[in-house]
Amino acid sequence: MKKLLQPVLNLALILVYIVVIAGSVVRMTGSGMGCPDWPKCFGYLVPPTEESELEWKAEHHYEKGQVIIRNKELRVVKDNFTSGENFNANHWEAYTKHDYAKFNPVHTWIEYINRLATVLFGFPILLLVACSIAYFKENKTILLLALAALFSVGFEAWLGKLVVDANLLPVKVTLHVLFVFFIIAFLIGLKYVSLPKTTLQYTGSKLNWIGVLVLVLTLIQVIMGTQVRQHVDIQMIENGYTNQSTWLNDAPLIFFIHRSFSILLLVANGYWIFLTLQLAPFFSFIKWPAIFLGFEMLSGIILYYLDFPFLSQPTHLLLSSLIFGAQLYSVLSLWKKKT
């Protein structure tokens, strides 16, 4: 099982970023309520493709938990039964968690694919825990981080349920996005502690604390970005998903702080990376935070000046999560001498 740890961990890291992309596409397209219930989708393991499948039918067998749309309301089957010639309300109950009752096949399948990606991501996480047990005697941290990642994935799934039940309440959507960074942190930490140890030549504290500062600044920027995104979400609903030029109308103060803060972030990262190249030139991985940060700032410029072109929002979020992961791994690697 020990030999499987690194391949499975690499797969988990790839999949968590795929989940980030999938979730961002859902948000970009307004598909969050494509499946109005959870964990199933309109009560099905595989969602419908046509609205007619959600209409009441005579002489049709219904399974408990299936959902139909009737009189612009969601109705849930209370028990297994076969319908007669007329609708019998005794077999149905209203869906009370929210009043959203629309079917858009594109939105439904975008949200469904997002959920499939999350489920798929869960399998390597479970396998990571199994592989980590073999390390329990020699390094308990490996198992603890794997268990933390597993708990975080479960908690993230529960947050996803709350988001749907609350009909995409912006605050809960934001928490759902932010918690992915906890999952990334546990996986990056697991990657660091499970790799074979090498001897570093640099053991000073200067790079350590500047790296921590840079990481904190990045998290602050991400949090501010989620606040800007909340405003954009509201504008998307009010002005329509095709009127991108209006999404930053009456932008809140946090948007301008977020935009200006990127300059501070660039300077801090530049100084940290420059010092690393001077004091620890053997640590070649430091180039990745710089590369991701450059593309992140470019994506932010594109978002603002080109009015949110297609896939620019998922790209922006993906790059921010890649920056965070690369910075965290760099901070851990430079924190102390490995033996």
Image (cartoon, grey):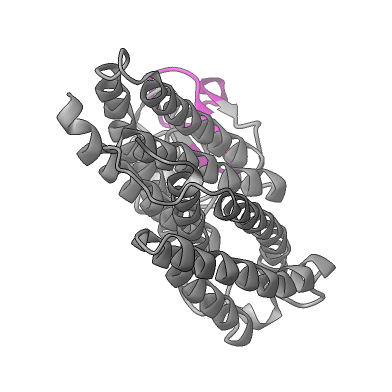
Please provide the residue range marked out in magenta.
Answer: 68-92
Tell me: residue 301, above or below residue 59: below
Task: Tell me what residue is drawn at x 27 percent, y 21 percent.
Answer: 130
Task: Tell me what residue is drawn at x 43 percent, y 28 percent.
Answer: 145
Task: Tell me what residue is drawn at x 41 percent, y 43 percent.
Answer: 188
Task: Tell me what residue is drawn at x 66 percent, y 40 percent.
Answer: 166
Q: Is residue 11 left or right of residue 338?
A: left
Q: Is residue 38 left or right of residue 122?
A: right
**Occupied quadrant, residue 263:** bottom right
Asked whether residue 313 is in view, the answer is no
* Residue 301 placement (x, y as % from top left): 59, 82
Of 209 and 83, nearer the camera is 209
Quarter of the image with the C terminus in it: top left
Q: Is residue 240 left or right of residue 287?
A: right
Residue 91 lies in the magenta-colored region = yes
Tell me: residue 159, above or below residue 177: above
**Occupied quadrant, residue 83:** top left
In the displayed orientation, state which residue is furthest to the bottom: 305
Q: Is residue 139 left or right of residue 168?
A: left
Quarter of the image with the N terminus in it: top left
* Residue 131 placement (x, y as % from top left): 25, 24
Tell me: residue 286, above or below residue 15: below
Asked whether residue 28 is in view, the answer is yes
* Residue 240 placement (x, y as % from top left): 64, 71
* Residue 200 placement (x, y as % from top left): 37, 48
**Number of numbered labels in the structure image:** 0
Tell me: residue 244, above or below residue 290: below
Of 231 and 256, nearer the camera is 256
Residue 58 lies in the magenta-colored region = no
